[in-house]
């Protein structure tokens, strides 16, 4: 398989033209994602890292931002299309994070609900561990006392807080802090996330299910195509996360020409010469 960091087409004698073309396209979208990551590191990351005493609301945005950035870092380490399954999984996660970044501004009591859901998931995990331990002989001894302590000290407060936040919903039915499934979340955010879910997320999902359902009988060019979809979804989602975080922390007042620099970063891998890069910078008013 081709290494995408090399960013060149494979010899036509080694692979057929369909695979070579698919690999070239994958490399292009890989470099677009990498260029956005570089923009983020140079223009956003330092400012975000310097935030002192962030509020609970700001911490929610930071949670989404850092998770998104680390996911992108992982994807950029996967420079061989044999990693298509992991690329697809990470891309789907990026879409969910981008939706979260938007919905923090649109769901009532969003900060309290997101933070509460984290506690609820911890409670569910602790309950599950103790329930399994009580009904099975374990092959390896597990110290379950921290889970019991968490339940003893936190369970009632979590139940009470949940009843206040979700008075008309039983907590066992709560699957996400918004109370919406992913399709509903993207529909509420609308474009571009609604289209990403409606098209690309479904394509990627088919290739990460267990068994051979997503890959059996596929031609060789399918695997770089899957990677291309993953890098494209990640790039679009990461852009949405960056924009929402920039708005929340008012970075447009701190970083000059932020939007134009982001547009430049997205378009830069499409340029084929220094002259084109210079012209692009001039057209965006960066020179």
Image (cartoon, rainbow, N blue to C red):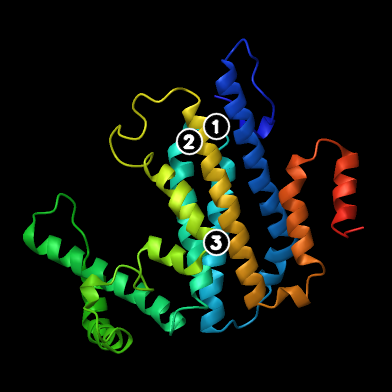
Q: Are marks 2 and 1 in contact (CB under 8 Å)?
A: yes
List the residue tagged with mark 3: 191
The image shows residue 36 at horizontal and vertical percentages of: 68, 53
* 139 lies above or below 173: above
Q: Residues within 10 Å of mark 3 (few under 14, many from 20)?
A: few
**Identity of the residue drawn at 56% across and 63% down:** 66
Q: Which callout, 2 or 3, points at the residue further toward the start of the chain?
A: 2
Tell me which corner region of the image, top left, top right, bottom left or bottom right, holds residue 40.
bottom right
Residue at image mark 2: 83
- Name the residue located 58 percent from the left edge and 35 percent from the top edge: 79
Q: Is residue 137 left or right of residue 235?
A: left
Of residues 227 and 189, the one nearer the viewer is: 189
In the drawing, does residue 215 fall left or right of residue 257?
A: left
| Image vertical order of residue 241 relative to residue 31, above or below | below
| Secondary structure of the residue carrying numbered label 3 | loop
Which quadrant of the rendered structure holds the N terminus? top right
Q: CA distance from mark 2 to mark 1?
A: 6 Å
Q: How far apart are the alpha carbons under marks 2 and 3?
A: 28 Å
Q: Residues within 10 Å of mark 1 (few under 14, many from 20)?
A: some
């Amino acid at each position: 398989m081709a290494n995408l960091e090399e960013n060149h087409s494979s010899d036509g004698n080694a692979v057929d033209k369909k695979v070579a073309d698919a690999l070239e396209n994958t490399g292009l979208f890989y470099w677009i994602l990498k260029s956005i990551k570089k923009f983020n590191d140079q223009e956003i990351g330092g400012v975000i890292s310097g935030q002192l005493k962030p509020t609970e609301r700001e911490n929610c945005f930071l949670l989404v931002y850092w998770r998104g950035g680390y996911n992108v870092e992982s994807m950029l380490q996967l420079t061989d299309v044999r990693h298509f399954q992991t690329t697809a999984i990470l891309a789907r996660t990026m879409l969910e994070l981008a939706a979260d970044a938007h919905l923090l501004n649109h769901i009532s009591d969003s900060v309290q609900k997101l933070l509460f859901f984290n506690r609820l998931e911890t409670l569910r995990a602790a309950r599950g561990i103790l329930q399994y331990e009580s009904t099975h002989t374990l092959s390896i001894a597990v110290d379950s006392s921290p889970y019991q302590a968490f339940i003893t000290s936190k369970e009632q407060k979590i139940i009470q807080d949940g009843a206040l936040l979700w008075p008309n919903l039983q907590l066992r039915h709560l699957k996400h802090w918004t109370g919406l499934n992913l399709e509903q979340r993207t529909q509420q955010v609308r474009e571009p996330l609604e289209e990403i879910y409606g098209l690309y997320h479904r394509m990627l999902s088919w290739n990460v299910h267990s068994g051979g359902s997503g890959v059996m009988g596929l031609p060789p060019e399918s695997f770089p195509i899957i990677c291309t979809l993953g890098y494209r979804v990640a790039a679009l989602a990461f852009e949405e996360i960056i924009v929402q975080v920039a708005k929340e922390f008012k970075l447009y007042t701190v970083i000059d020409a932020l939007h134009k620099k982001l547009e430049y970063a997205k378009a830069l891998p499409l340029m084929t010469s220094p002259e084109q890069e210079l012209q692009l910078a001039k057209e965006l008013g960066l020179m």
